Amino acid sequence: MTNRIIIIGNGIAGITAVKAIREVDKESEVFIFGEEKFYPYNRIKLSKNLFDELSEDNTLLLKKSWYEENKVNIYVSKKVTKINIENKEVVLCDKSILKYDKLLLANGARNNKPPVEGIEKAGVFNLRTLQDAWDIKSKIKKGESVINIGGGIQGLETAWNLNQHGINVSIVEIQSRLMPNQLDEKASKILQDSVEKFGINIYLNTRVNKIAGNNEVEGVVTSSDEFIHCNKVIYSAGIKPNIEMFEDTPIKCEKGIVINEKMETNIADIYAAGDVAELDNFVPGLWNISIGQGKVAGYNMVGKDSTYKHIVPVTTLNAFKLSLFSMGCVDENNATNVLVEDNDEGQYMKVFVRDRKIVGAIVIGDTKRSPILKSAIEKEISLEAIDLSKISVTELLNNIQSKK
């Protein structure tokens, strides 16, 4: 018996689910509905390659022909507006109704809009979609000044691309340092110094209260009443899961759609994955986690039992003539041993150990050996036989590598 599977959302979680479904089941009907006018594309490229040739075709996750070859019905510019759980139906924006046997909610998230006066002005941008990237590229000109609200990975990558194209950039960050969840204080300072060497001003412990200007942006007013001149504003202040459509349904939502480790919601035959989903009170908003969740959801929807194994979050940055890798828990208070190695050439490595296993790592500089740390964390390799009081990070990496 073939099923009809409907997937709401055509981001990486939804597309990974489709691939998993077709690995196991070649016959069930599969429908994917996406709000954007584009076929599924790689969002990671948007901030990394902002001023490169960002066309739909060179950002695609899969060739357009793949969907027809694999009997997948994909619809763009087609929003699902309502779910009728009792009748197992979805209602589309054109009022048409489609029944489902299994339903995957993978409609992602949107960028948080900071509570800032003037945030709706022309000249204020955020970077979430391919159209957003095109707008930024076409409307921000060389020689202009831009305020980036938010100093996370997307904000930093965007600032780097703008800087390299002759645009004056300042970063306003509400936290006391850059990337405090991924870096320790020393690593944050190394990163800050690298950013500032390119003429980028960084305002820490600072909130934007107002975007000033009448018909166009003229600057921002900060929480300390400082006026900073700019022509444009870009905000990168976290994400908000798109759960509004489900709030008048029995589907349990808190920060996101609440799921278990099989990606099941509290409603039979309805699954969720990716940026819209909340597992163990956490909405990660990370690409590699969306891939893992999408795969598990796809398998379970077609009867291949699969359980999500928690993926350790990884952050990488290649900008400002600096390479950075961070993974796992990088809090000394949650570690029993900490190994540190650095030099005058900008290399900095810090490894966090708990219960004789590596639980986190920071590498700045030469990150070529970071896959060794990644593997050790993911595989929970035991360091039982190693005297951690008498070993450097490099020696630890050599030891781990020799045992592979």
Image (cartoon, rainbow, N blue to C red):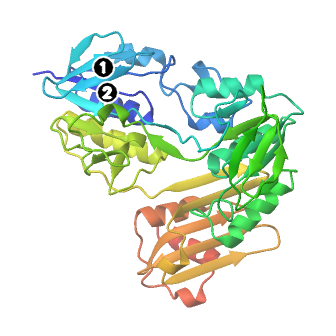
| Residue 398 can be seen, yes or no | no
- Disc tally is 2
Q: Position of residue 268 (x, y in %)?
A: 15, 38
139 relative to 338 in the view: left or right: right
Q: Is residue 265 above or below residue 176?
A: above
Where disc 2 sits, the SS reads strand
Q: Is residue 390 visible?
A: yes
Disc 1 or 2, which lies upstream in sequence? 2
Q: Which residue is mark 1?
A: 31
The residue that disc 2 covers is 7
> Which residue is more in the foreground, 121 or 246?
121
Q: Nearer the viewer, residue 129 or 14?
A: 129
Asked which secondary structure carries label 1, the reply is: strand
Looking at the picture, does residue 352 appear above or below residue 150? Answer: below
Left or right of 26? Residue 368 is: right
Q: Residue at x 42, y 71 (%)?
A: 381
Q: Quadrant of residue 68?
A: top left
Q: Is residue 1 left or right of residue 34?
A: left
Residue type (three-letter) at the residue carrying disc 2: Ile
Farthest residue to the left: give it. 1
Question: Where is residue 91 shown, x and y percent of the image?
Answer: 27, 18
Badge 1 vs badge 2, beta-carbon distance below 8 Å? yes
